[in-house]
Image (cartoon, grey):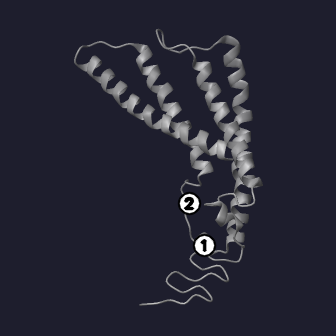
C-alpha cells in the first residue's frame, strides 16, 4: 500500500507540473494566433492530451488519500467501525464496479484505436490518439484495483498504523479507554502545576 501511495503522490505532482505546461502552451497558442496570425493544429491537440493527463493523474491520490468531496451529514459522528464499514461498502459497491465497467466499456475502443494506430481527426494534428484512449482505460482499471485493495485493508482510510490499531468503539475526538483526554492526567500520573 505504501508503494501505491508513493506512486499516487508522484502522479499527482506530475499532474501539477502539467497544469503549468498547459497554461504556458495555451498562452503561446493565443499569442501566436491573435498577435502573429500563426498556429498549428498539433498545438490544439497537445492541449487536449495535457488536459486528459491533468484530469487523470491525480485521481489515484484522491482515492487512496480519501480526499474526494464528501457531504458529511452523519459520518463524522459515527463510531470508527461504522465509518470503516461505510468506506468499505462504498469502495466495493460503488467505486470498484463503476470503474471496472468504465474500463471494460472503453477497452473495445482502445483496442480498435491501437489496431489502426489512430491519430488526430484534424489534418496536421498529433498522432497517438490511441495512447490517450489507453491512458483513460488504464485510469479506470487502476482506480478499480486501488478501490479493491483499499477495501481489503482492515481500515481502508486509517490515518496511521496507530489509528488502524485502535478499537472500533472510539468516536472521533474521544479518548481510548485507559487514555487521558487532552489536558488530563493519565491514570496513575501525578500532575504538578496548573
Q: Residues within 10 Å of mark 2 (few under 14, many from 20)?
A: few
Q: Disc 1 designates what residue?
A: 74
For the image, the number of numbered tags is 2
Q: Quadrant of residue 131?
A: top right
Task: Name the disc covering residue 87, or none.
Answer: none
Q: Residue at x 62, y 29 (%)?
A: 135
Which type of secondary structure does the marked residue at label 2 adopt? loop
Q: Disc 2 designates what residue?
A: 70
Q: Which residue is at the front of the view, 194 or 74?
A: 194
Residue placed furthest toward the top: 124
Q: Where residue 39 sits: x, y (%)? A: 34, 14
Q: Which residue is at the front of the view, 119 or 60?
A: 60
Q: Which residue is at the front of the view, 28 or 15?
A: 15
Q: Where residue 81 sits: x, y (%)? A: 72, 70
Q: Which residue is at the front of the view, 103 or 4?
A: 4
From this view, report whether residue 184 is shown above or below residue 4: below
Q: Residue at x 45, y 37 (%)?
A: 16
Direction from residue 42 to residue 174 in the image, left or right? right
Residue placed furthest toward the left: 35
Which type of secondary structure does the marked residue at label 1 adopt? loop
Direction from residue 17 to residue 174 in the image, left or right? right
Amino acid at each position: 500500500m505504501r508503494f501505491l501511495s508513493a506512486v499516487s503522490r508522484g502522479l499527482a505532482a506530475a499532474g501539477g507540473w502539467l497544469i503549468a505546461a498547459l497554461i504556458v502552451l495555451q498562452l503561446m497558442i493565443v499569442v501566436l494566433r491573435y498577435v502573429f496570425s500563426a498556429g498549428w493544429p498539433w498545438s490544439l491537440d497537445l492541449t487536449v492530451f495535457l488536459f486528459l493527463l491533468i484530469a487523470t493523474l491525480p485521481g489515484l491520490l484522491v482515492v487512496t488519500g480519501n480526499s474526494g468531496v464528501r457531504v458529511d451529514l452523519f459520518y463524522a459522528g459515527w463510531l470508527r467501525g461504522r465509518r470503516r464499514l461505510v468506506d468499505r461498502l462504498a469502495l466495493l459497491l460503488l467505486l470498484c464496479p463503476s470503474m471496472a465497467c468504465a474500463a471494460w466499456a472503453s477497452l473495445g475502443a482502445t483496442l480498435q484505436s491501437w489496431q489502426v494506430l489512430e491519430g488526430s481527426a484534424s489534418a496536421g494534428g498529433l498522432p497517438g490518439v490511441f495512447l490517450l484512449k489507453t491512458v483513460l482505460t488504464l485510469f479506470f482499471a487502476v482506480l478499480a484495483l486501488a478501490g479493491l485493495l483499499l477495501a481489503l485493508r482492515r481500515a481502508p482510510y486509517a490515518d496511521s498504523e496507530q489509528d488502524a490499531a485502535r478499537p472500533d468503539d472510539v468516536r472521533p475526538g474521544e479518548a481510548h479507554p485507559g487514555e487521558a483526554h487532552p489536558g488530563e492526567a493519565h491514570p496513575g500520573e501525578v500532575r504538578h502545576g496548573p
